Structure formats: C-alpha cells, structure tokens
Image: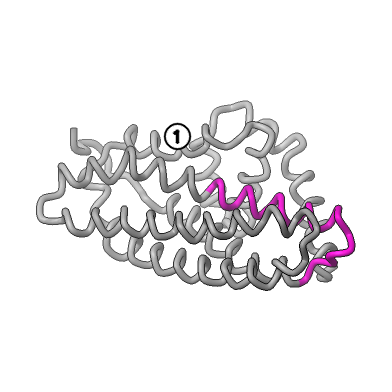
Amino acid sequence: MENQGKPITTHDMVVVHRMFRREFREAPGRVRGVRHGSRAQVRLVADRLVLLLDTLHHHHESEDRLLWPKLAERVPGQSELWKRMQDRHAGLSVHAGRAKALLGPWAAGASAHGEELAAVLEQLSRAVGEHFDQEEREALPLVPGAVSQAEWDEIGAAAAAAVPRNRLLTVLGMLLKEADPGEQILIMAHLPLPPRVAWRAVGERSFRRLEERLAQAVGHG
C-alpha cells in the first residue's frame, strides 16, 4: 500500500550514501599509503575494504529486492528510471568484483597488485558518486509518496541484518563518523536496542581506536 500517514524522510539514505562516498574516496589512498612490509597494517586496510564492498552489496541488494519493485509498481511513468537504478547496481557490482579479486592477492603480499587495485577503487568511487547523485536527485524525492514508513524501515533493516554481527558496530561507526546530532538520532532510531547499547558502551570507543590505527597504517598518524 502507498504511504497514507505522515510523509517519511529519506535523509537517512543520504547519510548512508555520504558514508560510502567518503570511504570509497579514501580507499585508493589507503591502498597506496600502507606500508606493504607490514602484514598487520595491510590486513587492517584490506579488512576495511572487504567490509566496505560487502556493505555496498547488501545496501544495493536490499534496494533491488525491497524498493525498486515497489516504486516501479506504484509510480507510473518511471519504469525507465528504476531500470537505470538497477543497471547502475549491476555495473557497480562488476567494479566491486574486480576490486575483491585484486584484494586477496594484495593482502597476501603481492604488492604489485596495489596500483591496479587503487585504480579500480578510483573507478568505483567515481561510479558510486555518479549513481548516488542520480538516485538522490531523481529517485529519492519520489519515495515518500509511494512507500510506507514500515516498508522504508525494512530496507535498512535488511541491509543491517546482512552485516556480520561482529562487524555491525564498525559499520555503525562508519555511518556516524560525519553525522550531525540529528542524523545520529535518525540512524540510531533504526537499530534495535542491543546494538544501540553496545555502541555507547564499547562500540564508539573501539571504532575511534580503529580509525587511529588505520590512520597510522597509511602514514596519517
């Protein structure tokens, strides 16, 4: 059913997009900057990149399953837009697959793959930014009139549920890193109580230490 109650806000999606934009923008520099003689530091960067690529996949998979089909059905005359959104996802998946194929050998010590990996991540960063620009400009404004709050919440919940439990607080830290207080409330409101409590108890401090270690690994500390 279409949204009949208070119009929903899609700004939480903008916050998610901001996280992906920042992380992919920083990814090539992390690959190029890490000291490849230090396996621990390379692994630290590689783990972050794997988490980023997996989280992007879960984000797009939840949209493909739970958002675009509803909008295609409920918003007349926009079938081409929803097809472009899904085509963009497919293209991004190809870029991400190339990055993951290079990540394994690079993390295992094949430093010769580093520049190729960084170049693929640069391409992916540009493609991600272009897709999000189009989505925020053309698709998100159509969502509030077509999707209920419960349906919108289901999209974020599905993406979050796909993240391994032991990585959820790291993803939350990535989301909250540049969020203002109102945006932090908006993001936290989508989470069940246990991860909200865990974030305040240990997650925020652990994520801050992780960020410091990453900065040191790529020579920014």
Q: Quadrant of the N terminus?
A: top left
Which quarter of the figure has residue 136? Answer: bottom left
Looking at the image, residue 190 sits to the left or right of residue 84; the answer is: right
45 drawn magenta: yes
Q: Tell me residue 43's x, y (percent).
A: 78, 52
Q: Residue at x 69, y 52 (%)?
A: 104
User: Within 10 angstroms of label 1, few (less than 14), some, or many (20 or more) residues?
Assistant: some
Measured along the vertical axis of the image, is residue 30 above or below residue 39?
A: below
* Residue 131 percent coordinates (x, y): 39, 64
Q: Residue at x 71, y 37 (%)?
A: 200
Q: Is residue 104 magenta?
A: no
Task: Compare residues 167 and 199 and report the one nearer the observer.
Answer: 167
Q: Is residue 212 visible?
A: no
Which part of the image, by quadrant, shows the C terminus?
bottom right
**Is residue 157 rendered to the left or right of residue 49?**
left
**Prevalent SS, magenta region:** helix
Segment colored magenta:
33-55
Count of numbered circles in the view: 1
Location of mark 1 (residue): 158
Front-lying residue, 115 or 178: 115
Residue at x-position 24% and y-position 54%:
82
Q: Amino acid at mark 1?
A: Ala
- Seen at 31% across and 57% down, the residue is 87
The residue most toward the right is 37
